[in-house]
Image (spheres, rainbow, N blue to C red):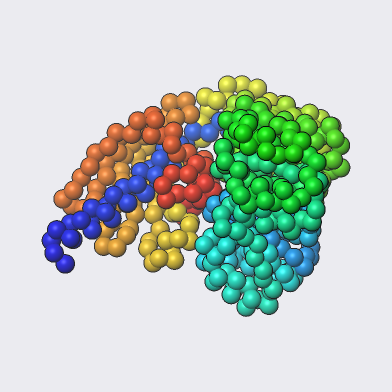
């Protein structure tokens, strides 16, 4: 290899690794401060959670089904194809389990065995979930079929066709997930298709589906900044349900259908509105319970808090989808269940030690997993290995409120050193939470996905 080519290769690899390093450094930076102290969930709650999104989906499934002939399999790393799956799952009284692109996670595979599943419907094409997953299922003696289209809009329309001849439809943005999750359990209970649309143009697949049905009511979820009036006007008997934020829209949806008395359950289901996987897996279970899904987050004030408190006051059981790293106990009934005080100024210190990234990706490509080592003196070191490069990222951190800023030193090898000062704006791009044992990624940044764990050794 020529010297110039080798240098270019090194630069490309180095740039990619810098993005990974910065992402994982951000993870440490926001993991330390947490609103309030770590406490137990309120008494009227049950939490369905696992080590990662795949185990969480498995735990939700095992709580709702002892046996099932059918299961829905959705991609666990991204949301578009899976958003419309809830009513299909309800049709077959089937759980929604999650898979990786090329292989079934152990938790998913074991759950399929435990439930004696005979038939799996894979949602999405082979560009999302490859034929290798089909082969794995067939090897387990499970019949496989796919429901999919050319893109997310065609896939949602294909799922809609599986639901017979409905008189109503939900129409949600296909470019984000919260609005679809807000209506998911309702769509399952009422067997209403969930159609995905972009903001301004109606895809032919959606238009053709609507024209082929006798639709007498269309619920457009989200304001005109999400789904334009141009799209709204093309649906029969359209009614817009929206709020200023995803949480306000979630509240508006639930209040609309509470008034129609479709929720027969003594439970309500709670999930984060910041990542899709837990609420997606929980949507089939919520429909089975005939319960709404309420989206909440960890902010000091959240518009859905009052709704949750009112339902709890009525004696409702609260079912939480996801672990304490995603939804800490402080976020559940925080205004009424915990002692008053200036909790926002309290912090939880991450214990010193080595935290290793748990994602299987690194093992699959033969790399040592990145890790974060936190020292007693308030410094940390990050190391990632790739090819013949070993990169170390070092620095110190300071906490101010719920934001952490620091100066770091990135060492590529014995010759190259880069010093970077991270700004507040950069820090806001990535968040991580300490769940009492491990670090849990909250927001996507580069290579790192929401829900990823750094496990303390």
Where is 295 relative to 161, above or below? above
Task: Pick the residue in front: 410 or 40.
Answer: 410
Where is 69 relative to 41, above or below? below
* Quadrant hosting residue 23: top left
Task: Pick the residue in front: 58 or 184.
Answer: 184
Position in image of residue 358 (x %, y %) = 48, 56
Q: Residue at x 77, y 36 (%)?
A: 237
Position in image of residue 117 (x %, y %) = 73, 69
Position in image of residue 453 (x %, y %) = 50, 51
Report the side of 164 relative to 359 (left or right): right
Report the side of 269 relative to 351 (left or right): right
Q: Residue at x 48, y 44 (%)?
A: 444
**Where the N terminus falls, by quadrant?**
bottom left
> Can I make out residue 297 in this image?
no
Task: Pick the residue in front: 180 or 55.
Answer: 180
* Quadrant hosting residue 199: top right
Position in image of residue 439 (x %, y %) = 49, 46
């Amino acid at each position: 290899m020529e010297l110039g080519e080798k240098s270019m290769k090194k630069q490309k690899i180095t740039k990619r690794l810098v993005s990974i390093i910065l992402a994982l450094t951000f993870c440490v930076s926001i993991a330390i401060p947490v609103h309030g102290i770590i406490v137990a969930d309120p008494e009227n709650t049950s939490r369905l959670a696992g080590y990662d999104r795949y185990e969480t989906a498995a735990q939700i499934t095992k709580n709702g089904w002892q046996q099932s002939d059918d299961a829905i399999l959705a991609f666990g790393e991204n949301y578009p194809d899976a958003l419309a799956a809830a009513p299909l799952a309800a049709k077959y009284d089937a759980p929604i389990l999650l898979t990786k692109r090329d292989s079934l996670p152990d938790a998913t595979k074991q759950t399929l065995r435990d439930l004696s599943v005979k038939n799996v419907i894979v949602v999405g094409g082979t560009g999302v979930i490859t034929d290798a997953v089909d082969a794995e299922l067939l090897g387990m003696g499970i019949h496989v079929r796919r429901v999919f289209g050319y893109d997310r809009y065609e896939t949602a329309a294909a799922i809609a066709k599986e639901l017979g001849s409905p008189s109503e439809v939900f129409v949600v943005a296909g470019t984000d997930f919260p609005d679809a999750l807000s209506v998911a359990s309702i769509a399952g209970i009422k067997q209403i298709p969930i159609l995905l649309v972009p903001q301004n143009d109606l895809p032919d697949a959606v238009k053709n589906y609507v024209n082929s049905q006798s639709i007498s009511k269309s619920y457009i979820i989200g304001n005109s900044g999400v789904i334009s009036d141009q799209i709204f006007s093309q649906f029969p008997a359209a009614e817009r349900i929206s709020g200023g934020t995803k949480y306000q829209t979630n509240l508006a949806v639930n209040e609309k259908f509470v008034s129609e008395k479709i929720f027969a359950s003594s439970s309500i289901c709670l999930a984060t509105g910041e990542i899709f996987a837990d609420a997606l897996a929980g949507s089939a279970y919520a429909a089975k319970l005939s319960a709404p899904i309420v989206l909440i987050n960890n902010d000091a004030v959240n518009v859905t808090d009052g709704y949750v408190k009112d339902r709890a006051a009525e004696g409702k059981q609260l079912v939480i989808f996801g672990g304490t790293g995603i939804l800490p106990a402080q976020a559940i009934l925080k205004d009424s269940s915990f002692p008053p005080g200036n909790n926002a100024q309290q912090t939880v210190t991450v214990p010193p030690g080595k935290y290793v990234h748990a994602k299987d990706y690194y093992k699959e490509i033969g790399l040592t997993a990145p890790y974060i080592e936190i020292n007693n003196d308030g410094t940390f070191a990050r190391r990632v290995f790739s090819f013949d490069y070993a990169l170390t990222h070092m620095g110190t951190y300071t906490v101010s409120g719920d934001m952490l800023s620091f100066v770091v030193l990135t060492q590529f090898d014995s010759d190259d050193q880069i010093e970077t000062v991270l700004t507040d704006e950069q820090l806001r791009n990535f968040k991580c939470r300490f769940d009492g044992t491990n670090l849990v990624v909250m927001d996507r940044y580069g290579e790192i996905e929401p829900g990823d764990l750094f496990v303390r050794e």
